Image (tube, rainbow, N blue to C red):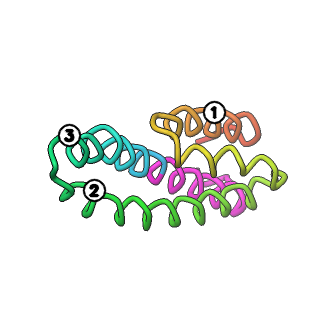
Amino acid sequence: MTNATPEARGLRAALLRFRIMAYVVGVALIVLVFVGIPLQIWGDNPNVVHVVGPIHGFLYIAYLVVGADLFRRAGWPIWRLWVVVVSGLVPFAAFVVERRVARQVGEQQPVTE
């Protein structure tokens, strides 16, 4: 890591932030969709939705900012960011997209330590 350029270190740091946010947003969305909404509909208990819904909304915005930063640092076109945008709204998609983006960054900037 000592011979890595500042751009490479910045890209790796942006990728790490993106990966963390992808997992956090993905888990929050799964809890919201598969726990909160069923409890609200069938259990007449909206508490989980009222707590996790705004948290997911805030985290989703942070996920978009972190994703945009990663894409800017990687020099990718804006249209590729749309997959990231949609993946934060579809259960389990954030995990799939996170792996794909990590692989693409790895191909673009191999890790040398």
Q: Is label 2 in contact with label 3 (beta carbons under 8 Å)?
A: no
Rendered location of residue 13, percent (x, y): 56, 57
The residue stretch that appears in magenta: 1-21
Of the numbered discs 3 and 1, the one sitting upstream in the chain is 3
Could you tell me the amino acid type at mark 1? Arg
Could you tell me the amino acid type at mark 2? Val
- Is 38 left, or right, of 104 in this rendering? left
Write the residue at 53% across / 59% down. Answer: 63
Of the numbered discs 1 and 2, the one sitting upstream in the chain is 2
Position of residue 88 relative to residue 54, above or below, is above
Q: Which residue is mark 3?
A: 42
Q: Is label 3 in contact with label 1 (beta carbons under 8 Å)?
A: no
Q: CA distance from mark 1 to mark 2?
A: 30 Å
Q: Is residue 80 magenta?
A: no
Rendered location of residue 15, percent (x, y): 58, 51
Of the numbered discs 2 and 3, the one sitting upstream in the chain is 3
